[in-house]
Image: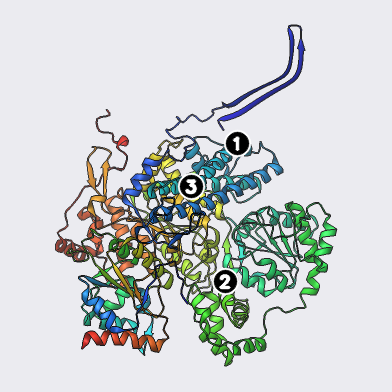
Amino acid sequence: MAEVAGPKKASVLNQAEVAMAVIRRAKRPLLLVGHRAAELSLGGRPLIDWVIRLSTAASLPVIASGKAAAALNQRHHPPAACMPVMDAANRLADPAWTGIDGKGGSDLVLLIGLPYSMAWTVLSGLKHFAPHVKTITIDNVYHPQASLSFPNLNEEEWAEHLGALIEHFEE
Amino acid sequence: MDRKGISLKIGEFASDVGQIRDLELSVGRITRDTWAETMGPTPFPGITALRSWDRLLLSRYRPFYLPFCDLCCLCTYGKCDLTGGRRGACGIDMAAQQSRIVLLAACIGAATHVSHARELVTHCIGRTGTRQRIDVGGVNVEVEAPITRLVTGVRPETLGDLGQVLEYLEGQVTALLSATHTGMEGDALDFESKVLHAGMIDQVGMEVADIAQVSTLGYPKADADAPAVPLGIGTVDTRKPVILVIGHNVPPAIGIIDNLHDRGLSREVEVTGICCSAQDMARYAPGTKVIGPISWQLRYVRTGIADVIVLDEQCVRTDLLDEARQVRSPLIVTSEKNCLGLPDRTEDTVEQIAADLASGRAPGVLILDPDKAGAVAVETALRVAPERKKQGVLPDLQALAVAAEECRGCVLCRRSCPNDLPIPDAMEQAAAGNLEPLGALYDTCVGCGRCEEVCPQELPIHSCIVASRGDGFSAETFTMRAGRGAIQDVEIRKVGGPIVLGEIPGVVAFVGCANYPRGGNEVAEMAVEFAWRKYIVMTSGCAAMSIGMYRDSDGKTPYEMFPGAFEAGGIVNVGSCVANAHIAGAAVKIASIFAKRNLRANYEEIADYVYNRVGAVGVAWGAMSQKAAAIAAGFWRLGIPVIVGPQGSKYRRMLLGRADRPEDWYVYDARTGERVPVGPVPEHLFCAAETREEAMVLTAKLCMRPNDTTRGRALKLTHYMDLHRRHYGMLPADLPLFVRTPADIPITMKDEVQKILAETGWKESTIPDPTLLPRLIRAGKG
């Protein structure tokens, strides 16, 4: 079940190799982390720990919204930037944005931990107004507005999908 | 009032010098100008009159569109696919299509308020006549209609004077709506300018509606000590006949209250209300019971407590006829805008209608006379209550467990829930005999009923949630201060200086509907937080009810904790949705009364003043409706930022500034004419926040203005830094953007801040007399 917006919808991401290849191909990938990453657990561990593992393994700079940034700080893994998701998306949509490090914008963003409706609308904004940015969602719900999205997953399946992606980078 | 129409007709007139027959003489308007203030540049502005001001705002706060649909389906050329930069068959692109949809929403909202205003003015004139003087606060309020004066350039003195204002508003809404037709406007920013115009029109409409009812119906008049009214289902004496009113247009509720009074039954029947009809009913008769915000409709109706349900207009669930049938409550609809397919019984006698409703021959009726609707509601409630009191309507515990056992755990309910509530887990627990998780959902459920719509087992999930609330409704017993209406001129004089100088850190208005991500308590907690911090907290409508449904550790509601005056640390309930005009009106009155700027038809200058000086922010945490969209647009045009909750991103576009683009943040110094940088203040005009914590941090940040004195800026920075550190565990990275001089640095954080400034290469800047308008530069003008 997904709220499909029209003819252009996300490819389902079932294979970690595909995700890894897309991330590796990107010149300046980013990980955008919402507050739910600081609230949810997955496979008996806080989701924020999965985020840290992924960002470390894949060398993904993190933009985190407030509560996620607080959780990352607590774990001594500060985000590259702390800002509301709307600010982050608005900057990503600007081809002239100089990026969080002043060296350039991003061509790929992975999203995790945003409220469903907000992720949906933000992904729509990027789909229509940021043709230079590819989007991947790695939450446990299918997001048709993304370029690539995990399918609807129960907790066990989500842990498998996320774990496989991280392990590919860790290998 | 200043302009009048004159029409003279002479059928036949004979005199010594001749005869006149069938002479008709019409003079469009003549002026009766009793207002000495000079007419400003934009009286009765058309839809492009303020376009250049809008463009100034929109050049800083560029729209970021969040389309809901890839297609345009509005004409028979379509559906047109607008993805990938494609244009529709009419030539429209995705950005323009989104702004067009935003304009449609704003027009719907503005039309609703203007139409409501027309109804109220007509009703009030019917009660007291056209010559009833407008009086919203006696001698305490001389500027009785600040928005109307500002926009139209007229000063209405009587109810009759409001007619001309309404004619103007109706014309503008029609023109704006026409711009959304296929092949009309095609530029996104011009659509956005029209959105702002719709918002401004909406503010005038709300003001007209509220000043008419405040002047006529005996409401509190700018009264900081407006009476406390009971709030919550637990306040209802369910042994008595109970009438429920839902909507926004108060005359039918007044019909009920007056009928009970006339029959000596005021103490025998409970009159209860949901949404803004309840707000206004409580202003009229403080003994009535406010049940709660809009999201309480389904749950309260499902309790079966209401013996009769009366609907008027706006935000009313359209399935309430079915819901009322389920609990055997007769339904009376009273608005020509909301007839629900029911027979018009307006011309029948009260006895005939009440008999048909009480017997069940008619499950519902349409009555377009508010007094008759009131009489029928009372008579019907008295007849049906004795039998209805014997019936239970919510599932009992045994039935609840049976229903829960039928749940297959398909998770469709959770997926369709706007707040992702863990309903399947709760149902599983309920089936095992533990009702607590199900009952716990009550506080965060927004009452949309989508869970039931998708359930393949057709389980009454919402009823189960309501029924499993452990304490019944006894804990739902609160108080709310009744809506006070306008802000007194003397209050403006007292706080105008501290607000403009930044020494009161801000005015925060919690407004809007109840589509909350995590329940109404979040609104209450935010209001309490900012009141403790000595901001001026204003509120209205459903948000005002949610603020009341909260108790501190001493058992006090926020209205008992904080005063109702427009002062630092006050929580000011202005009233129903239409009373929102008093919030914008207060900002306008600061410019007019405190700063003595000309108000009359002088929109651009006053908006420039408010934008650069008045640190006001609106927070519509549960905004849901098109009216909320229009209200927000009215604030934007005045330069007042609005924050919405995560669901607010569904309004399809944000208006976001870019703090990382220093070139965007220059103003003119009115003293010298120089262009000077002032930093991103306020950073956004419209932004959705993800969490309550993010909303609070943003609120403190968006209260900063270029005009802040160093003392004021230091105070505002103290709150911003403190909230940021408390909720995010660190100081804000953008802090240097808001420090203009060393004196801006909060004294208690001096070392820490100076270190950050040194690391970022911060440079001192000047504090200007800020304006965006070159014509306000005084240099060289002698």
- Of mark 3 and mark 2, the one earlier in the sequence is 3
> Horizontal and vertical percent for residue B212?
61, 45
Query: Where does the image place residue B449, in percent across and percent down from the top left?
Result: 58, 73
Residue B20, relative to residue B744: is it above or below?
A: above
Kindly report which numbered mark, 1 or 3, lies closer to the viewer in this rendering. Answer: 3
Quadrant, the N terminus of chain B: top right
User: Is the same chain shared between marks 3 and 2?
Assistant: yes
User: Helix, strand or loop at disc 2?
Assistant: loop
Q: Residues within 10 Å of mark 2 (few under 14, many from 20)?
A: many
Specify whether B94 is left or right of B241.
left
Residue ID for mark 3: B198
Label 3: element kind: helix
| Left or right of B722 on screen, residue B475 | right
Which amino acid, mark 2? Gly
Q: Secondary structure at mark 1?
A: helix
Q: Which residue is mark 2?
A: B447
User: Which badge, 1 or 3, comes first in the chain's sequence?
Assistant: 1
In this view, the residue in front, B74 or B47, is B74
Q: Return the residue at label 1.
A: B161
Q: Nearer the viewer, mark 3 or mark 2?
A: 3
Q: Amino acid at mark 3?
A: Ala
Within-10-Å neighbours for mark 1: few <14, some 14–19, many 20+: many
Tag 1: amino acid: Asp
The quadrant holding residue B481 is bottom right
User: As displayed, is residue B464 above or below residue B90?
Assistant: below
Residue B580 can be seen, yes or no: yes
Q: Disc 1 is attached to a residue of which chain?
A: B
